Image (cartoon, helix red, strand yellow):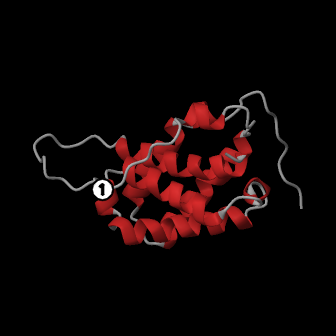
Amino acid sequence: MQIKTILSILVAAVMLLACSSESPDTSAPTEKSLYDRMGGQKKVKAIVEDIWNNHSANPIVKDRFADSDPAYVKKRVFEIFAAASGATDVQYNGLDMKAAHKGMNISEMEFNAVVDDVLAACEKHKIAQQKRNEVLAILWSVRKDIVNSHIITEALVN
C-alpha cells in the first residue's frame, strides 16, 4: 500500500477513533452514534471528498497523495470513518494506526496539516463544534502511533 494511501486512511482512522471515544450516556442506550449525528452516509462521504480535496491542495501533505488512487483512498477513508464513528453497516478491516504508518516518517507538521484538513472539511459541512471536538480528540488520540517524534521540520516559508 502506498504511503500516500496510508496517510489518507490515517485521517479517516483518526476521525473514527475520535468519534468512538465519546462516552455514552448509560441512561440513554438509544443515543445516536456520531456517524448518525453527523448526517450518516451521504454527509460523511461528502466530508471525505472534501478531506481528499483539502489534502490534495495542502502544500504540506499534497505530495504524499500525488500518486494515490483517489477512489480507493476515499473508499477506505469512508470505511474507517464510518466504522469508528458508529456506523453499523460499514466495516473497516485495515491495519491499526501504528502498523499502517510504520516507516512513513510522518512529521508533527504533516500530522497537524492533516488534522486541519479534516476539521476544515467538517466545518465546511456545518458539523457542530462539539462534534468537531470529538473528531479532534480522536485524531489526537492516535498521534503517538502516527508521528515520528524524531523528525524535526521547519516552518514553511513563502
- Report x, y in % for residue 85: 36, 51
Residue occupying the point 37% across, 56% down: 130
Q: Quadrant of residue 150?
A: top right
**Location of residue 148 in the rendering, given as x and y in whole percent from the top left corner:** 71, 31
Say which residue label 1 marks: 89
Q: Residues within 10 Å of mark 1 (few under 14, many from 20)?
A: few
Relative to the observer, which residue lies in front, 150 or 45?
45
Give residue 123's position: percent from left, percent from top. Answer: 49, 67
Question: Horizontally, is 126 left or right of 74 in the view?
Answer: left
131 lies above or below 29: below
As drawn, 77 above or below 146: below
* Element assignment for label 1: loop
Report the residue at 38% width, 49% height from top. Answer: 91
Q: Residue furthest right?
A: 158
Q: Tell whether 25 sits left or right of 81.
A: left
Left or right of 64 on screen, residue 85 = left
85, above or below 52, in the image: above
The quadrant in which the C terminus is found is bottom right
Farthest top residue? 150
Q: Amino acid at mark 1?
A: Asp
